[in-house]
Amino acid sequence: MTDRFRVTLAQFNPTVGDLAGNAAKARQAWLQARAAGANLLALPEMFIAGYNPQDLVLKPAFQQAAMDQVHALARDCSDGPAIAIGAPWVIEGRLFNAYVVLQNGEVSAVVQKHHLPNEAVFDEKRVFEEGPIMGPFSVDGVRIGSPICEDAWHEDVAETLEETGAEFLLVPNGSPYYRGKHDVRLSHMVSRVVETGLPLIYLNMVGGQDDQVFDGGSFALNPGGALAWQMPVFDEEVSHIDLERQADGWRVVDGARASHPPEIEQDYRVMVEALRDYMRKTGFSKVVLGLSGGVDSALVAAIAVDALGADSVRCVMLPSEYTSQASLGDARAVVDALGVRYDTVPIAAGRAAITDTLAPLFSGTAPGLTEENIQSRLRGLLLMAISNKFGEMLLTTGNKSEVAVGYATIYGDMNGGYNPIKDLYKTRVFDTCRWRNETHRAWMFGPDGEVISPSIIDKPPSAELREDQKDSDSLPDYPVLDAILDVLVDQDGSIADCVAAGFDADVARKVEHLLYISEYKRFQSAPGARLSRRAFWLDRRYPIANRWRDRGAVPD
């Protein structure tokens, strides 16, 4: 009877659609597992396809190619530890999210996911069939139960596995980050351990995919829920974890317990990793952005340098007659601190040409928002031209507060391929800038020390599209706006909830109105890093044409 069992965990970063590349990473991990004398190599959920493949997984050719890679992996890795790997799998014409076990050159078991998430960023019921609740599979005489991701958030799968002889639980995941997610995962897994009395190994992937970042943080729990071992967040890593058979069952041998950084650091790391992987996985190597002298573009520049390095970032100032000397100086300070290329492209001549072109049509009308937006759209045109000419992806720089209420110009400052701060409210932008000035980590490619001048952080925000313009001319002050948006968006609350929280009903209604009428802009906006449970994209899907407004009673 086996008294010790070693599992090698590959907390890896797959690329959606790169079947051969993902298989190669699995082979690399298998070689390390074999060298370490492991019984089993475990890889995350849907690893061979990358996660989340969305409707790509519905293509029969993709399904077959993925399964072919798994069979080839089984043949190539026949003389060593077993492999458990996530993959799309077709059984009798039905497509499953599966965890496939490879032993002795062939597929020995196919675990099918039972609970398919159909909320937030997940649409698995659209693409996969619901599998049966299955029993454990056996590796070297040890019976292992594998609830796949969502399956472990429910009691029934784990309890069935325990009742049918599982000796420990191995939970493969593709679980993306949002603030506080690790504690939520840990709570659910402790429940499964307490209910079943079995040790549990939770394996999560890392890396960015579109708006989502998978944050790793894999861990192991012993019966009773004690944390025995924990991997770092965000880092690719291979770890070997041992289980020992004791008189009352298996136990995970205590090992390293990596600590997790605070929330503000995790958010920043997500924005960096999201951009870094989005660039790598889409084939871009350099970025360009408009640097206005404001806090949002300064933070995006810092994120870009930390993600890609200074040599891969171009900043462009596009001044008009409304651009202040303070903004010019602040932009220059950011450029000097980060060490990036800096170009200046004045827009006065182009704006004059557009104004002259439209003058006959606009004759007799008063200048206003249209003329302000021409400036923004001209900047967007010029930045896109630079992007096209030099093959540098344009980053857009609108924070969540602006994206929420439409305080951004479509086809202007909303132009771009990616927005790192799309899910970061303005008040968090200020806090994040201060944090970055005080903090440097090994995963940052940018310099240590102050990279965003305090004058940028402390000055009143302004779009600088007219004389003496301030954001507060059009919007509530950002602490008020962000708090109302937190109620309406993040908490899905009502106007009455805003009033109960101490905000003026008319101000809350104005914010709600702006939120709804800006849906069409968000529908056309660039993707951006998801930091919360209510990010603008898959987490919150509202109709563009929508006349509903909250007319419910407001408490006196």
Image (cartoon, rainbow, N blue to C red):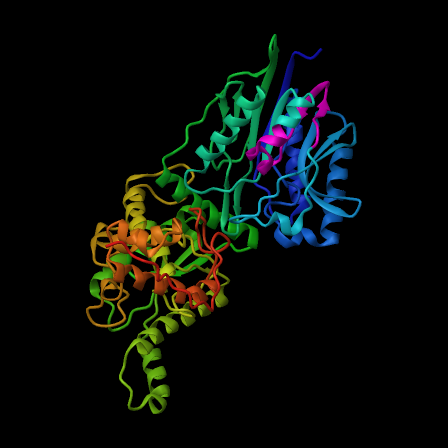
Q: Please give left or right for residue 141 compared with residue 464 in the image.
A: right
Give the image location of residue 497, x and y in percent.
32, 51
User: Which quadrant would the C terminus be assigned to in this image?
Assistant: bottom left
Q: Is residue 148 magenta?
A: yes
When asked about the image quadrant of residue 366, the answer is bottom left
- Identify the magenta region: 134-158
Q: Considering depth in this image, is 227 or 513 the residue closer to the camera?
A: 513
Left or right relative to 253: residue 28? right
Residue shown at the point (41%, 69%) measured from the top left: 410
At x 69%, y 23%, the residue is 164
Tell me if residue 62 comes above or below residue 370 in the rendering.
Answer: above
Q: Quadrant of the N terminus?
A: top right
Q: Is residue 151 left or right of residue 219?
A: right
Determine if residue 239 is in view: no
Q: Is residue 2 above or below residue 267?
A: above
Task: Tell me: 28 left or right of 217.
Answer: right
Residue 528 shows in this picture: yes
Can you give x and y, in whole percent of width and height, for residue 397 in the image?
38, 58
Q: Nearer the viewer, residue 406 or 51?
A: 406
Give whichever of 364, 322 is nearer the camera: 364
Q: Is residue 267 inside the magenta stretch? A: no
Q: Position of residue 511 (x, y in %)?
A: 32, 61
Picture layout, residue 330 above or below residue 21: below
Identify which residue is drawn at 50% across, 22% down.
229
Where residue 451 appears, as percent x and y from the top left, is 30, 48
Q: How many marks?
A: 0
